[in-house]
Image (tube, helix red, strand yellow):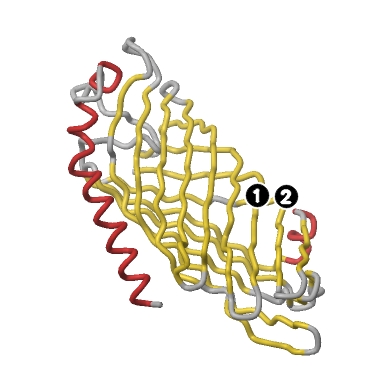
Amino acid sequence: MRRSLIRRCCLGAAAFLLMAVLGPAALAEAGPAVSALNPNRPAPDGFLAPTLEGDWRFRIAVAPWLPNVLEIEGSTALDSGSTRLDLVWLLKAMYFYLPLDFEVRKGRFGLLYHNFLVFLDPDVPDEILGPITLSLDLKLMMFDVGVTYDLARWRLWDASNAPELTLEPYFGVRIIHLPIDITIGASEVDEDLSSQVPVLGLRAFIDLTKHWNLEFIGDYGGWGVDNNHQTWQGAAYLGYRWPGLGAHWNFQVGYRAMRLFEMRQDVTDISMDVRGANITFGVEF
């Protein structure tokens, strides 16, 4: 299984590097809309506005996710079931939560890190998914680590004050740590829903004005590595940024949907989907 992970990561990294090398040349030949890219314009001075110029740039943010839907589905060879939990349940059950974002970039390349750690109260009642009983006395840890590449930037129409679009693909690894107790009928088993899987994604930034900005994120991964056959996310944010104290600050609100995993084990198949509002407050310097 580890060899499969290494092989898939190597293939993804090769595709990412090929895109990084050939992408700018392909865009230059793609036509007027893309050739409108203006590398000589003043560099964007805002948070979440990637730049090809300048020194090292760092971004640190807290990004609390407030999901109104937490859906878990489970099945065995004989039967299946599901449960849907909401934000009220999560707030009552949760006793520790830590969501952090960190980025560093130099030139076109960057390194991103995102995590959320969720610890639930040991007294939370079990959830029944048809023939499966899940003990939700759990500690869920998820980490996204990846390399980003500033592929292209151009104005959306021919005007000096037109909104500017940036496309930034990324390749990385999604690490999920989730050991859990599962009961099937009268048998209790210790399942490990943890996985480490490769992920390919794309981020798009639109600087509407000096202060207002949009961000879109989408990725997909899994492919059966560590029994995780599918993980993905899609997110959209509206942000407002301002300078202060020698840095740039940004406050974003948006919506995020994610399939954390689709695990296919020897005895059970279990998937978890989470979606809801996301708030981000960070600083870039």
- Residue type at mark 1: give it: Arg
Q: Residue at x 74, y 59 (%)?
A: 91
Depth order, front residue of 265/36: 265
User: Can you give x and y, in whole percent of width and height, for residue 183 in the image?
Assistant: 75, 83
Q: Nearer the viewer, residue 206 or 32?
A: 32
Q: Is residue 187 left or right of residue 284?
A: right
Query: Dot 1: within a 10 Å radius of its alpha carbon, few (fewer than 14), some, or many (20 or more) residues?
Result: many
Q: Is residue 178 above or below residue 262?
A: below
Task: Work out whether residue 276 or residue 281 is closer to the camera in this orientation and state it.
Answer: 276
Q: Nearer the viewer, residue 239 or 146?
A: 146
The answer to whether 284 is drawn above or below residue 274 in the figure is above
Image coords of residue 167 (percent x, y):
35, 35
Spatial CA distance of label 1 from label 2 is 6 Å
Which element carries disc 1, helix, strand or loop? strand
Residue drawn at the location 36% of the way across and 72% of the way down? 4
Q: Quadrant of the C terminus?
A: top left
Residue at 71% x, 58% y is 71
Residue that mark 1 sits on? 275
Q: Residue at x 21, y 32 (%)?
A: 26
Residue 68 numbered mark, or none: 2
The quadrant in which residue 113 appears is bottom left
Q: Earlier in the sequence, mark 1 or mark 2?
A: 2
How crowded pointer 2 is (Cα within 10 Å; few <14, some 14-19, many 20+) is rated as some
Q: How many marks?
A: 2
Given contact means CB atoms under 8 Å apart, are the residues at marks 1 and 2 in contact?
yes
Residue 105's place in the image compared with 90, above or below, is above
- Measured as percent of width and height from the top left, residue 70 is found at 70, 57
Give percent across and percent down for residue 79.
77, 71
Q: Which residue type carries mark 2? A: Asn
Q: Is residue 92 left or right of residue 38?
A: right
